[in-house]
Image (cartoon, rainbow, N blue to C red):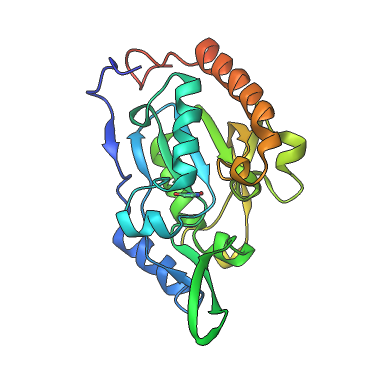
Amino acid sequence: MSNQNQTSSHIGPVPLPPELVHACLERVKDLRLEGFLTGFGRWPGKLMMVGEAPGATEIQNGRPFSGQAGKVLDGYLEALEITRDDLYITSAVRSRPYKDKPVKGSPDRLSRSNRTPTRAEVLAFAPILDREIAVVQPQILITLGNIGLQRLLGEEYTITAWHGQLIRRRIQQVHSEHPEQGYHLSDQEYCIFPMYHPAAVLYNRSLTDIIADDLRQLREQINENLQMRGNQQGP
Ligand code: URA
């Protein structure tokens, strides 16, 4: 997949207006979130992955999916016969949600761990994801786990019910300056392909075969419907 015409697209973070980022970070400044990480990859491009939120490793080295889940994600990409340069990777929340717990035996010390982002945190970062989708204009949006799926399609969608299927729908968006007003549906329809989050298999090995099947379905969709080779801007 590497011999693509590189002239019409870029590899890196989608440029975000500083005031958009500043407003998002202001909204979450009192929440248990740390750092800020942009998405990374090809834009405009045909494929985009939407995860949950960066973890400690990602915040430390500034690259999405660079920790343990990232190794599993690289296996997904290998099964799809693509590389990180072929797609854009981002997540619903762009800071690390954390929780602090007293260390057993030394209650005056705290240990920090990742946690699932809340609904309010996902909404606060929604203008950034909206902007990334508008710039990338993906032909398939691959959501990773429930958080990415529900951010785009609503909470009635669950990964257990919808994984491995291509869904064509309008997606949830927010007013860029007033996300607190809540979601409305986009004018445009998008193709969404829900996948289990790569971290899920680290906790539940029985998902291995299901994920392999979903990846086969997705690879077929990519090969049949997207001309990944050649100009990424093409139809
Ligand atoms: N999980 C995500 O959703 N994103 C990352 O970058 C890492 C783990």
Quadrant into which the N terminus falls: top left
Q: What residue is drawn where x is 32% and y is 16%?
A: 231
Q: What residue is drawn where x is 64% and y is 31%?
A: 208
Q: What residue is drawn where x is 39% and y is 55%?
A: 57
Where does residue 74 sit, x and y in percent of width and height? 44, 32
Where does residue 130 sit, x and y in percent of width and height? 48, 48
State how many labels appear.
0
Where does residue 103 sit, x and y in percent of width and height? 53, 78
Q: Residue furthest bottom?
A: 108
Where does residue 166 sit, x and y in percent of width and height? 65, 26
Q: Nearer the viewer, residue 110 or 144?
A: 110
In this view of the protein, can residue 149 be seen by the observer? no
Q: What residue is drawn where x is 67% and y is 26%?
A: 209
In this view of the protein, can residue 24 be seen by the observer? yes
Q: Residue furthest left?
A: 7
Q: Is residue 128 above or below residue 166?
A: below
Q: Is residue 170 above or below residue 117?
A: above
Q: Is residue 3 above or below residue 102?
A: above
214 on left or right of 139: right
Q: Residue furthest top?
A: 224
Q: Is residue 181 above or below residue 159?
A: below
Q: Nearer the viewer, residue 153 or 51?
A: 51
207 on left or right of 124: right
Q: Nearer the viewer, residue 184 or 217?
A: 217
Q: Residue furthest front?
A: 105
Name the image quarter holding residue 165.
top right
Quadrant into which the C terminus falls: top left
